[in-house]
Amino acid sequence: VSGDRVVGPLSLARSLRSGPPSLDALIRHIGSTSLERRFRALVQRYLPDQQDEILNAGQGRRNGDWESREDERVSQFCGRFSDRYFPLVEWEELEYVVGFIPFERHGWNYDEFHDVEELRPAIQILLLLCEDPYRQGGALDGVRVVLMEKLEDVLGKPLLKRVPKAMDPETLHATLDDTPFKPMAEFIDWVWGRTETTFLDVNDEFEVYDNEWDPQTVKELTSQWHTASGILDRVYALFDWIEANPKKNFGMIVDAVIANAPPAKPDDPKRLIDIFATPEDAYTYAHEDDDGYEAPEPGDERLALPAGAAG
Amino acid sequence: VASADIVAILRGVPARRLRIFELAEQLRAQDGTFDLDAAGLRDDELRLAENEAELYTRSTQRALAMLRQRLLEP
């Protein structure tokens, strides 16, 4: 009895009667567990020995609501997966992790390459030897002109004037692979997106469609990360070494490039000064210095400026 | 089409055993809740079963709408 109402004699029986569940309700209920199921499937497949730590993460939090628990669990998964396979971006939302593999992207993009002021000193120096990937074969290279000016105090004019023309990855590999400076060529591969590893060749501007979670893709990416991390280790060691003594150590690389570079074609400018300066500039610049270099006179056929370079 | 014919047609439709019912039963934990750990291991099956059930629901709703239209036609 509730208030004035008298409960009918069959109410209880009706309440307890079980019938087939509504199909819609069943689909909704099971569908609402989809993200959680897929997350557990990932944990079970890739980190079965750490299931308890991941799935129970955040449980002990005081006042921890379900959302913050979810953040903690996803963060735990990303961190532990990264330690075992390859680095993932540490998302805290389930949907960003279970949909596609959120692998870290270290590829260069246009802004990074052109915003040279933001780059660490060793990269600024090494880019002097790197042909602009966005203007392949281009004559006047704005990035390197800016770098030349910026690095004059660090490297000195004599060394800057010995810097050969910028090279593409193939030429630098042919030049340096048999020397201790092979990481220089690997650095250029990275800048050009030619490392053949997804991690170093893809940046945030790329739309990637085939990074769904499946064991074959995880295996392939793990193998690629092994290659990519090796490249990064060697390249960062090169950066440290350059920065320890920029003038001396970059000078050694320049010497190696000059000694091993393939013979220039007759119309190839040989040095950076030949590329960015007008014939008059090159002449003046060379004669200001006392390192023994004689710039060709304007009009001299040895000064092989590419078409349009002289303005 | 007469109502009696429609009933006869409906009776003639073969039963469809939807996988989602079977899985829901198999994935019921001892306390009656949905066993998410077990479901995680059978996620592919569940997704297929969900799609099958959704398709079935939509088809049924379409058939129902057509029947209503027929029966209510002047």
Image (spheres, rainbow, N blue to C red):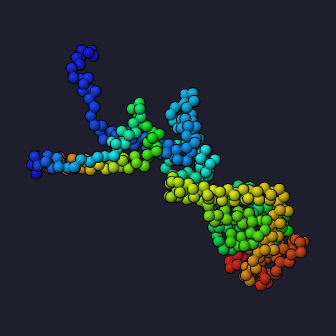
Q: Residue at x 78, y 83 (%)?
A: A302
Q: Picture coordinates of residue A110 (x, y %)?
A: 62, 61
Please tell me whether residue A192 is drawn above or below residue A46 in the rendered image. Answer: below
Q: Nearer the viewer, residue A153 or A209?
A: A209
Q: Is residue B59 left or right of residue B5?
A: right
Name the quarter where the N terminus of chain A is drawn: top left
Name the quarter where the C terminus of chain A is drawn: bottom right
Quarter of the figure with residue B39: top left
Quarter of the figure with residue A289: bottom right
Q: Picture coordinates of residue A98 (x, y %)?
A: 50, 47
Q: Is residue A67 left or right of residue A23?
A: right
Q: Picture coordinates of residue A160 (x, y %)?
A: 81, 67
Please tell me whether residue A296 is drawn above or below residue A108 in the rendered image. Answer: below
Q: How many marks?
A: 0
Q: Residue at x 65, y 57 (%)?
A: A226
Q: Residue at x 77, y 84 (%)?
A: A301
Please tell me whether residue A91 is drawn above or below residue A202 in the rendered image. Answer: above
Q: Picture coordinates of residue A145 (x, y %)?
A: 74, 66
Please tell me whether residue A130 is drawn above or below residue A10 in the rendered image. Answer: below
Residue A311 visible from this viewpoint = no
Residue A43 visible from this viewpoint = yes
Q: Is residue A206 left or right of residue A157?
A: left
Q: Residue at x 52, y 31 (%)?
A: A65
Q: Is residue B27 left or right of residue A20?
A: right
Quarter of the figure with residue A64: top right
Q: Nearer the viewer, residue A308 or B24?
A: B24
Q: Nearer the viewer, residue A146 or A9?
A: A9
